[in-house]
Amino acid sequence: MDVVEVVKALGDVTRLRILNLLNKETLCVCDLEEVLKISQSNASRHLTKLRFARLITGEKQAQWVYYRVDETSLERYPFVRELLVKELVNEPACQKDVVRLRKYRELGGSCERTVHITE
C-alpha cells in the first residue's frame, strides 16, 4: 500500500523538516545540508525515503539533483498538504528552518556558491 510508505516517510522529524523546506522552494542536497546542518549522507538517506514514498521528485541538472514536493502526491494524499500548510508552519523547528533558508539565499547560497549560515 502506497499510503503506508507515505506515513512511514512522515514519521521522522528530519524528513518533515525537509518536506517543509521543499514545499517553499526547489533545493539540492547541499542546500539542505547547510540549512538543516546535517551531513550529505544523512540528507541523501532522508531524500531517498521521501522519493520512495513519492512525496518528492528530483531533477538532475549538471552534477546536482534538485528536489521539490511532488504535487501529484499532494493531490492524492490531501492530509500531506494539510500537514505542510497548516501544521508544520507552526512548528518552531520548521519556522527556524525557513528563516535559515531565507538567510542562506540572501547570502547567495547555492550549489554553485557555498555559504555558511551563522546563528
Image (cartoon, rainbow, N blue to C red):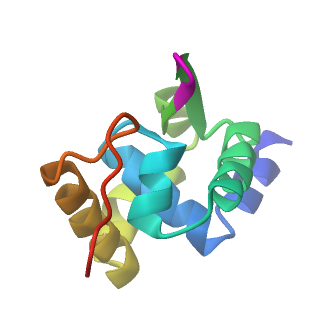
Asked if one can make out residue 81 in the rendered structure from this viewpoint, the answer is no
Q: Nearer the viewer, residue 60 or 12?
A: 60
- Which residue is at a point 65% across and 47% down the rendered structure image? 47
Give the residues in magenta: 61-65
x, y percent for residue 45: 74, 53
Q: Is residue 116 above or below residue 56?
A: below
- Which residue is at a point 33% across and 57% down the rendered structure image? 85
- Which residue is at a point 46% across and 30% down the rendered structure image? 71
Asked if one can make out residue 74 in the rendered structure from this viewpoint, the answer is yes
x, y percent for residue 68: 46, 35
x, y percent for residue 43: 62, 56
Compared across the picture, whether 74 is left or right of 45 comes to: left
Based on the picture, tell me whether residue 113 belongs to the magenta stretch: no
Q: Which quadrant: the C terminus?
A: bottom left
**Number of dots carrying numbers:** 0
Q: Nearer the viewer, residue 52 or 115?
A: 115
Residue 87 image-quadrant placement = bottom left
Q: Is residue 113 above or below residue 4?
A: above
Q: Is residue 63 above or below residue 19?
A: above
Compared across the picture, whether 28 is left or right of 98 comes to: right
Characterize the magenta stretch by its predominant secondary structure: strand
Q: Is residue 69 above or below residue 39?
A: above
- Which residue is at the far left? 106
x, y percent for residue 90: 30, 76
- Which residue is at a point 59% across and 73% down the rendered structure image? 13
Q: Which quadrant: the N terminus?
A: top right
Compared across the picture, whether 51 is left or right of 22 comes to: right
Based on the picture, tell me whether residue 62 belongs to the magenta stretch: yes
